Amino acid sequence: MQKFLIILVFLLINSSNVISKENNYFLSLKKNKVYVRYGPGKNYPIKYIYKKKFLPIKVIDKKDNFRRIIDHKKNSGWIHQIMLRKLNSLIILEEKIVFKKNSKFSKPLVKLEKGRLVIIKKCNPNWCRIQTGDYIGWIDTKNVWGI
């Protein structure tokens, strides 16, 4: 009986972790000026203001029309859903090379520095086709924020 209870508790804990991870997803900011609030409502004070359109953020909770988010620097707060859009960007977390094709043996186009915001054109499991400035190419998806 004791073994059965231990297994049941283990399964419940693991299933709740799976559910919470499935609820986390990435979106990006729709405007150049987005208010982040302390709570899920317009009556809550503004915590800080994002001033970067397309910034990728992770949604970690929701309440009514507000989404609790966290960014790549671990800042968090609540944003109205109208200020968010489907994910279309990444932030580079370490220096990366943009390649002409989705292979490290392809021609390198440009080197990106840590913290660079890039626009996603399309992705597969290990590579994303991105645009940054005048360059369109492929980067590997290791150490990026947004997918």
Image (cartoon, grey):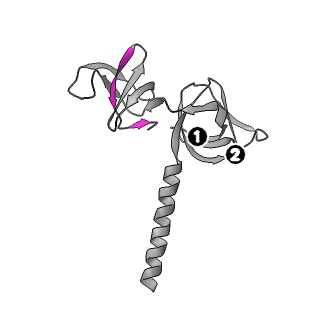
At horizontal 35% and vertical 38% (from top left) the residue drawn is 142
Q: Which residue is mark 1?
A: 75
How many other residues sit within 10 Å of disc 2, few (<14), some (14-19) or many (≥20)? few
Upstream in sequence: badge 1 or badge 2:
2
Any mark on residue 64, and which? 2
The amino acid on which the numbered mark 1 sits, given as a three-letter code, is: Asn
Closer to us: mark 1 or mark 2?
A: 2
Q: Is residue 137 left or right of residue 145?
A: left
Please state which amino acid type lies under the numbered disc 2: Asp
- Residue at the location (50% across, 33% down)? 87
Q: Position of residue 57 (x, y in %)?
A: 54, 37
Cα distance between the residues tagged 1 and 2: 21 Å
**Is the N terminus in the top left, top right, bottom left or bottom right quadrant?**
bottom left
Determine whether 138 is above or below 17 in the image. above
> Can residue 129 be found in the magenta stretch?
no
Residue 99 percent coordinates (x, y)? 29, 23
| Mark 1 surroundings: few (<14), some (14-19) or many (≥20) residues within 10 A | few
The residue at 43%/27% (across/down) is 120
Secondary structure found at label 1: loop
Residue 83, given in percent of the width and then of the height, sits at 64, 31
Q: Up-down: is 94 above or below 111? A: below
Residue 97 left/right relative to 120? left
What's the magenta region?
135-147
Give the residue furthest to the left: 105
Confirm whether the magenta stretch covers residue 137: yes
